[in-house]
Image (tube, helix red, strand yellow):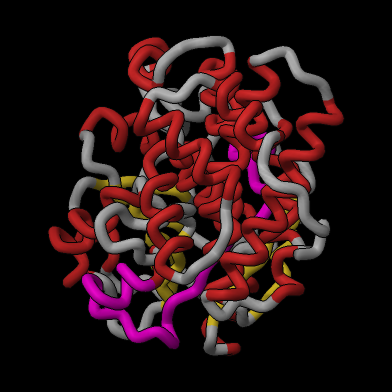
């Protein structure tokens, strides 16, 4: 029987643990906080997914070595900007033959590395064992067992199939792929675009405006992803446009909701103080922009969102700047 270890007890890590369990894969979860571990062992992660019952096949512990021991699949679901520190602490306990799955959607600050690159570098995990899961996967909807699909991407077909088989639940359909670069870039960039769409909503703009940002955001994502070696078809699929639509339009999306508050006039610091959390797009905007500039890729929406986050530019200024750019062909 395949067994899985999930490192991270946030909403998506817990929801994916539930998917694995419902697919018949026993799960051990690692969490830093003893109170969180105790709640999961009692059958509910009330902090992130209140009201969602967890089956007895999901257990939790603060002992990283015990959680990882004998696991066929190790799932990494910690915040992307803490991955390096976490792997430095317990990366040595990851089993040498296990598939290592990244659920994280970010680009590392300071290095502009994708999460799989950090896993390979710091965790000492061979590239062939790294698998990425990404798609339109809002944790609350998946925890409610609403039908969803996702992409399971890896360079080794056997490892990819191992993960896909382990998470093929009645309500969760995994599609396999080999484009790790495109899948990761899609998942990271869509968070920044969702901030921009949220800002538009906060300004009181309508669906035409939001659809325009989503579409041009997809163009930016595709330009950057293909420049890094991703496949164009990936950005037209579940990991690309599918995840982009879900994240940009849903009130369940933390990035969308964060952007709405920015559009209403709050500063980043005020939104963080009000919500007690920072959206992934806020953390990754600078590193994604650095990555784009390094490869000579034009990403005006990302650039304006980063200016708002770092320089305090107002949402209405961002919109005005984007609309006043020189005209060009849509496909240029």
Q: Residue 169, can we see it?
A: no
Residue drawn at the location 26% of the way across and 49% of the way down: 82
Front-most of 176 and 112? 112
Q: Where residue 250 sits: x, y (%)?
A: 70, 30
Q: How many marks overall?
A: 0
Question: Does residue 226 lie above or below 278 as drawn?
Answer: below
Question: Does residue 63 lie above or below 75 as drawn?
Answer: above
Front-most of 218 and 191? 218
Residue drawn at the location 61% of the way across and 33% of the way down: 321
Question: Which picture quadrant has residue 310?
Answer: top left
Horizontal relation, residue 15 to residue 128: left or right: right
Residue drawn at the location 17% of the way across and 72% of the way down: 92
Residue span colored magenta: 117-142
Front-most of 328 and 303? 328
Q: Where residue 291 sits: x, y (%)?
A: 42, 62
Residue drawn at the location 53% of the way across and 89% of the way down: 156
Magenta-colored stretch includes residue 129: yes
Q: Residue 275, can we see it?
A: yes
Tell me the quarter of the image containing the C terminus. Answer: bottom right
> Given the current orientation, which residue lies at the most extreme front position?
326
> Given the current orientation, which residue lies at the most extreme left position?
89
Question: Does residue 289 lie above or below 269 as drawn?
Answer: below
Q: Where residue 256 sits: x, y (%)?
A: 60, 29
Magenta-colored stretch includes residue 67: no
Question: Which picture quadrant has residue 224?
Answer: bottom right
Front-most of 285 and 137? 285
Question: Does residue 66 lie above or below 230 as drawn?
Answer: above
Q: Where residue 115 sits: x, y (%)?
A: 39, 64
Question: Which picture quadrant has residue 123?
Answer: bottom left
């Amino acid at each position: 029987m395949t067994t899985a270890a999930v490192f991270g007890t946030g909403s998506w890590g817990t929801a994916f643990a539930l998917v694995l369990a419902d697919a018949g894969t026993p799960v051990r979860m690692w969490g830093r906080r003893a109170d969180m571990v105790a709640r999961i062992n009692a059958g509910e992660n009330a902090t992130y997914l209140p009201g969602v019952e967890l089956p007895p096949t999901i257990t939790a512990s603060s002992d990283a070595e015990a959680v990882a021991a004998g696991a066929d699949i190790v799932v990494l679901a910690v915040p992307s900007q803490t991955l390096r520190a976490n792997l430095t602490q317990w990366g040595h306990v990851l089993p040498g033959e296990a598939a290592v799955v990244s659920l994280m959607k970010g680009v590392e600050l300071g290095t502009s590395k994708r999460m799989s690159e950090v896993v390979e570098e710091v965790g000492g995990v061979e590239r062939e064992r790294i698998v990425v899961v990404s798609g339109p996967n809002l944790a609350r909807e998946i925890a409610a067992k609403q039908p969803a699909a996702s992409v399971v991407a890896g360079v080794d077909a056997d490892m990819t199939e191992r993960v896909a088989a382990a998470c093929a639940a009645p309500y969760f359909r995994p599609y396999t792929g080999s484009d790790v670069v495109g899948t990761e870039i899609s998942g990271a960039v869509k968070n920044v675009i969702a901030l921009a769409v949220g800002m538009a909503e906060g300004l009181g703009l309508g669906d035409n405006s939001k659809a325009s940002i989503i579409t041009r955001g997809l163009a930016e994502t595709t330009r950057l992803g293909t420049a890094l070696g991703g496949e164009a078809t990936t950005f037209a699929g579940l990991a690309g446009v599918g995840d982009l639509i879900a994240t940009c339009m849903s009130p369940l999306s933390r990035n969308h909701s964060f952007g709405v508050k920015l559009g209403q006039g709050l500063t980043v610091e005020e939104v963080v103080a009000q919500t007690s959390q920072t959206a992934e797009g806020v953390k990754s905007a600078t590193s994604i922009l650095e990555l784009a500039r390094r490869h000579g890729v034009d990403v005006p929406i990302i650039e304006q969102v980063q200016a708002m986050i770092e320089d305090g530019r107002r949402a209405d200024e961002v919109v005005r700047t984007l609309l006043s750019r020189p005209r060009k062909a849509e496909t240029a």
